Image: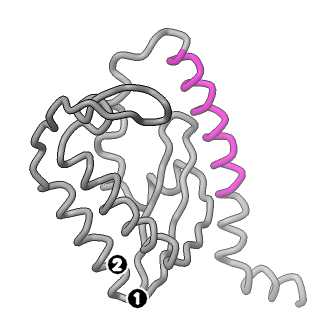
Amino acid sequence: MRQWSIGTNDYYYTGSIWLEEAPWYIFALGSFIQWICYFFPRIPLPKIKIIREGEETNLKDWYGTTGDLFHCFICDPIFGWCWGKIKSTYIEFPYLKLKEEFPEMFKDENNIWDDQSEEEKLVREKNSEYSKKVGEEFNIYYKKLQNISENRMKETD
């Protein structure tokens, strides 16, 4: 089975397209265990004293809840095993090209940056400018690549 996805970073304005390949049951098991983990009850553990890593503590402070225990000792190892069976390939693309091709993936892109400092705003603006420059260069060569057979025929005539 193959699964495609798009990844973006709206701080550095980078993007990539992922292809993940594995048998269908690997994806099914990973999704199923994450679903169980999400709905597993979060019951606080009692404050029974224990010693971990040479330090005296208690179950509640060390592990938290039943959901945390499930995640650490069941969900995460199973999902990690699944992830190890998945062959991942990714191709980097300019941020703006992905935004142009897959606009639905970018509808909430600025909401997470509402409380950023002035310094972070400047860094993001510089990153955005650099990304636009790289994207423009990419588009020049991408258009040439789209018309490569036409262009090569003209050159050989």
**Disc 1 and disc 2 in contact, CB within 8 angstroms:** yes
Q: Is residue 149 above or below residue 110?
A: below
Q: Amino acid at mark 1?
A: Met
User: Which corner quadrant holds the N terminus?
Assistant: bottom left
Q: From this view, report whether residue 92 is shown above or below residue 114.
A: below
Work out which quarter of the rendered image holds the C terminus and state it: bottom right
Above or below for 22 versus 135: below
Q: How many marks?
A: 2
Name the amino acid type tagged 2. Answer: Phe
The answer to if 123 sits in the magenta stretch is yes
Instruction: Report x, y in % for residue 12.
Output: 58, 37
* Label annotation for residue 27: 2
Q: Which residues are magenta?
A: 120-139
Q: Secondary structure at mark 1?
A: loop
Looking at the image, tell me whether mark 1 or mark 2 is earlier in sequence order.
1
Residue 130: % across, % down = 67, 35
Element type at mark 2: helix
Where residue 54 sits: x, y (%)?
A: 49, 31
**Image quadrant assignment for residue 48:** top left
Instruction: Tell me which residue sits at (12%, 44%) in the image.
Output: 42
Which residue is drawn at the image coordinates 33% and 20% (left, top)? Answer: 114
Residue 18 relative to residue 40: left or right? right
- Tell me what residue is drawn at x 17 percent, y 63 percent: 36
Q: How is the image coloured?
A: one colour
Residue with the mark numbered 1:
1
* Foreground of the two, 109 or 55: 55
Residue count near mark 1 (Cα–Cα under 10 Å), binned few <14, some 14–19, many ≥20: few
Direction from residue 1 to residue 32 in the image, left or right? left
Are there few (<14), some (14-19), or many (20+) residues within 10 Å of tag 2? many
- Main secondary structure found in the magenta portion: helix
Residue appearing at x 57%, y 33% in the figure: 128
